[in-house]
Image (tube, rainbow, N blue to C red):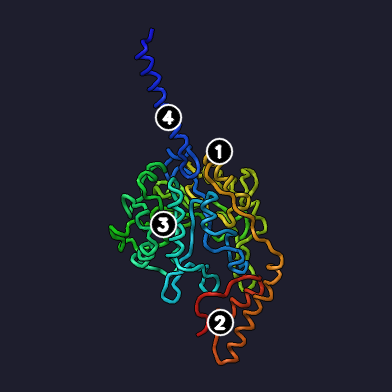
Amino acid sequence: MLSLRSLTYLLTSLSITSAAWLTTRETACNNSPDLCSKAYNEIVHLGAHDSPFVRDASTDYSTSGNQYYNTTVQLSAGVRLVSAQVHESNSEWHLCHSSCDLLDAGLLSDWLKEIKTWLDENPNEVVTVLLVNSDDATVSELAAQFTTAGIVDDCYVPASTSTPPTTWPTLETIITGGKRLMTFVASLDTSTITTDTSYLMDEFTFIFENPYDNTNTSSFTCAPDRPTAVQNDVSAAIDSNRMALMNHFLYTVGAFDIETPDLTDINTTNSDSTSTAGALGQSLASCKSDYGKVPTFTLVDFFDQGPAIDAVDNMNGVTSPTGRTAVPARDTDDESASTWSKTSFEGVETLAEDVKDGQTPKLGAWIWAAGSWTFGGINLSGGNVLS
């Protein structure tokens, strides 16, 4: 028979154990307690392709926009990878869609500040940034943007900048360490990475991608495309310990061969179905089978459609996500849409007036203006279009 002292000790121990278990269960990592013990490369991170390029009133509903909502809304809704293109404009580093004459989303440092604010407000989340280094910014130039944004102290530093690890730390370990921003750049001169800038990881040292320039669902494949060292060789890609990034979005081709995000079948493209050809769920399952493990990242357009997060939750085994904020109602003002053609044609008229004034617009300016008129919404703001 247990003595009163022994019984008290047993009950106290059970209470402490239960409390510890409940604390673990109540602490969510990337919106789920079930993911805390998972390594960073053992789960799928939902990515917003061209995150800062939005299709809303702020861009006159530009058809170059890849998302309906800004980066803050994306992160709050469950996106954990945000990508952007970096271009030089007027001696500053901007986020521009293909060209700063087409769609300019502002300074890289301002966007990083936005991410910093979100990270500070969400201390149990690990976020990944993927920068496409379109104009070959140097390591020091990019690092200066991170310093300006005050986000360097949040950046994860890998054990090696030249060799990917076999296994990454768990989300819980990363969160506890306080370095919750993973930063990959395509691409960098790795020989110029210093100890102080080692948080800037060369994408293709650590990641391989499938093809990204797709215009038909039949083009989706899990075959590695970049880097060329592992192109079309799944075994080589996996054996290299690179993480898989699965591009899953479509383009439509219009006049002047200008590609814009395809919305025609977006709810199918972003669907969680594992049996529908071209669906996100089907592609994730197919690539998991080919790779022998889940793709670490997937990039989608218009992440809220589908919604894409359902396919990712299914792949991660998340059934009861916590801490997410539903996206607000989207502005679908028909009156705004009806002004596209008029506003776009004004771009052509403006260039004609410039010619009358003796200026000589660049050929690209005429192409963008005509494309804007054709597509209804391509944004001409940003950058110098006059020679």
Q: Is mark 3 on a helix, strand or loop?
A: strand
Residue 379 lies, in percent from the top left, at: 58, 72
N-terminal label among 2 and 4: 4
Q: Nearer the viewer, residue 179 or 202?
A: 179
Q: Distance between the residues labelled 1 and 3?
A: 30 Å
Q: What element carries label 2?
A: helix
Quadrant into which the N terminus falls: top left
Q: Name the residue under label 3.
A: 184
Residue 87 lies, in percent from the top left, at: 45, 70
Does residue 168 appear in this view?
Answer: no
Instruction: Say which of marks 4 and 3 sits in front.
Output: 4
Identity, as a three-letter code, of the amino acid under mark 3? Phe
N-terminal label among 1 and 4: 4
Instruction: Say which of marks 2 and 4 sits in front.
Output: 4
Q: Mark 4 points at which residue?
A: 19
Can you tell which mark lies on residue 320?
1
Looking at the image, residue 163 sits to the left or right of residue 374; the answer is: left
* Local crowd size for mark 2, using a 10 Å CA cut-off: few (<14), some (14–19), many (≥20): few
* Local crowd size for mark 3, using a 10 Å CA cut-off: few (<14), some (14–19), many (≥20): many
Q: Distance between the residues labelled 4 and 3?
A: 38 Å
Identity, as a three-letter code, of the amino acid under mark 4? Ala
N-terminal label among 1 and 3: 3
Instruction: Say which of marks 2 and 3 sits in front.
Output: 3
Q: Mark 2 points at which residue?
A: 363
